[in-house]
Image (spheres, rainbow, N blue to C red):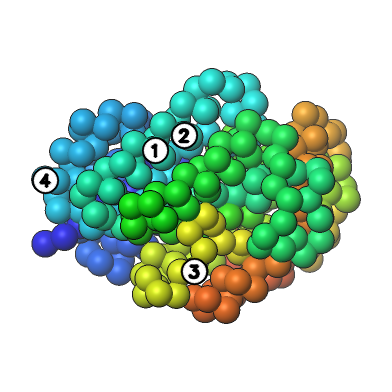
Amino acid sequence: MESILVIGANGQIGTELVAELRRINGAERVIATDIKEPASELKNNGPFIQLDVLDQVKLREIILENRVNRVYLLAALLSATAEQKIKSAWKLNMEGLLGTLELSRELKFRLFWPSSIAVFGPSTPKDHTPQFTITAPTTVYGISKIAGEQWCEYYFNRFGVDVRSLRYPGLIGYKSEPGGGTTDYAVHIFHEALKNQSYESFLSPDTELPMMYMKDAIRATIGIMESDAGRIKIRSSYNIAAMSFTPEQLAAEIRKHISNFRITYKPDIRQQYADSWPHSIDDSCARNDWGWQHEYDLSGMTGDMLQHLSQVLVHH
Ligand code: AKB
């Protein structure tokens, strides 16, 4: 029996990706790994192995022993944390990828690696940012993502490594707390809206960013991984998009459900990172090449998020 490996399974994307992969493929076939002890759901619902992605010997062993044919490499430091820990962010984000690309070259598994809208920088066109345009990131995280994209393309062109990647926008989900990103305000705001009916935003009211509901992001991730190889024409990373909004617009949408919700603004250093990123993304290549389509817009996402998160908070 072949199996699927998720590295960094404890994180914002990993938690939801493992659950969905287990639902589709059966729990026993999906091995979750992370450097940290997992939340109980991950551990109790299927195999979990503690793994530091930089331990390439152990990673190779796990892949061989379990006949892994799909690897999702999600271990990374996000934008805000990476600015605080420049060298360890570079080490984890780059060496983790390079080591896994090497293993994929040797062992021939299909590899997913996440890129981000952070590959773009202040000189990139801000609206409907095209697939192929200026990428001159000004954050450590963005530099690691654009370098990673080039490495993915290199390993595909030179060695035929079947690597696939998406440039995620800000992701919003209710299953896990976000960790160290700039777009995280759009998750925290829901927690605070439900608990305290108020939120202090670290981004200014009119900061428009591309965003996506986690359910769409998970469908995109599994969708690109399960597409026929011939449809994957871009081996650096695909733009994908669903919606764009500002903190003010999100607050107004939340107020349709929680009428006394109040938002205040106190921008911090993360404002700079957000200001260097696009407002909206042109994802027509992903739509044309392998049929990407989003389902959730601002109003659909907000309703679903509030409904599910309120249940999660009641049980905690
Ligand atoms: C972050 O804010 O760092 C991430 C991203 C946009 O990649 N969510």
Kindly give the residue lying farthest to the front in the view shown: 158
Q: SS at mark 1?
A: helix
**Residue type, label 1:** Leu
Q: Residue at x 46, y 26 (%)?
A: 91
- The CA span between labels 2 and 3 is 23 Å
**Label 1 – label 2 distance at C-alpha:** 6 Å
Q: Residues within 10 Å of mark 4 (few under 14, many from 20)?
A: few
The mark closer to the camera, 2 or 3, is 3
Residue 193 in the image: state x and y as whole percent.
71, 49
- Name the mark nearer the viewer: 3 or 4: 3
As drawn, 63 above or below 51: below
Q: Position of residue 154 (x, y in %)?
A: 45, 49
Number of marks drawn: 4
> Mark 3: few, some, or many residues within 10 Å (few <14, many ≥20)?
some
CB within 8 Å, label 1 to label 2:
yes
Q: Is residue 117 left or right of residue 289?
A: right
Q: Within the image, what quadrant is residue 2 found in?
A: bottom left
> Could you tell whether 243 is left or right of 294 in the image?
right
Return the mark for residue 306. Answer: none
Residue 235 seen in this snapshot:
yes
314 left or right of 9 in image: right
Q: Is mark 2 within 8 Å of ligand 1?
A: no
Asked whether the viewer can see residue 41, the reply is: no
Q: Distance of mark 3 from mark 4, alpha carbons? A: 32 Å
Tell me which numbered mark, 4 or 2, is placed earlier along the sequence.
Answer: 4
Give the residue pinned by disc 2.
94
Q: Residue at x 38, y 52 (%)?
A: 158
- First reached walking from the N terminus: tag 3 or tag 4: 4
In the image, what residue occupies the spot 28% across and 48% down? 105
**SS type, badge 3:** loop
